[in-house]
Amino acid sequence: MVGRRGRRSAGSGVQLTFEVIAEALRERIRSGGLRPGDPLPTQAVLMREFGASSLTVQKAMTLLKQEGWAVSRPGKGAFVAHRDHPDGADDLDGPEVTASAGGTTARVEALELALAEAAQQIADLRHRVEALESGGGEQGR
């Protein structure tokens, strides 16, 4: 059972909203509705579709990225990862991934990506604070 602030009791089989969103996107990818390289739905689209907050959608996207289902491209959005390897390793063929996995260039690119995502989250939070301060914030999410 889901309690306050999205926590669930031990042994509960109920999925949290971010898990439901992530599973729905995984199923779209598995079924071919979303193919490698396709853009994933935007945060706004997912918020409307699932009636979820921006933080919930961000958690779902973070989970998909951690699992190798999605990749972010700064300034472009999130995309379905290329999953050609049986172990689920990402095999991007775009210019964003040009160095070997152990190379310094790859590490710098990964850090730049993480920084861009953090900057976007800060901008989103700043917008939410401004909306709350002006009286137009989200209700109870």
Image: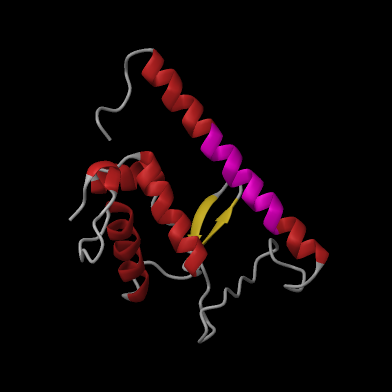
Residue 141 is left or right of residue 98, and the answer is left
Residue at point 76%, 72% (across, down): 102
Classify the position of the N terminus by image quarter: bottom left
Depth order, front residue of 123/15: 15
Q: Which residue lies most toward the front here?
A: 10
Q: Which residue lies most toward the bottom here?
A: 86
Classify the position of the C terminus by image quarter: top left
Residue 92 shows in the view: yes
Q: Which residue lies most toward the left here?
A: 1
- Residue 93 in percent (x, y) is at 64, 71
- Where residue 25 sits, quadrant-wise, is bottom left
Residue 76 is left or right of residue 115, and the answer is left
Residue 130 lies, with reference to residue 125, above or below; the image says: above
Residue at point 38%, 66% (across, down): 34
Residue 113 lies, with reference to residue 27, above or below; the image says: above
- Residue 134 in percent (x, y) is at 38, 12
Residue 75 shows in the view: no
Magenta segment's dominant SS is: helix
How was the colour assigned to the protein in this rendering?
secondary structure
Q: How many numbered marks are there?
A: 0
Depth order, front residue of 112/82: 112
Task: Tell me which segment is drawn in magenta.
Answer: 110-122
- Where residue 99 sits, quadrant-wise, is bottom right
Residue 2 lies, with reference to residue 65, above or below; the image says: above
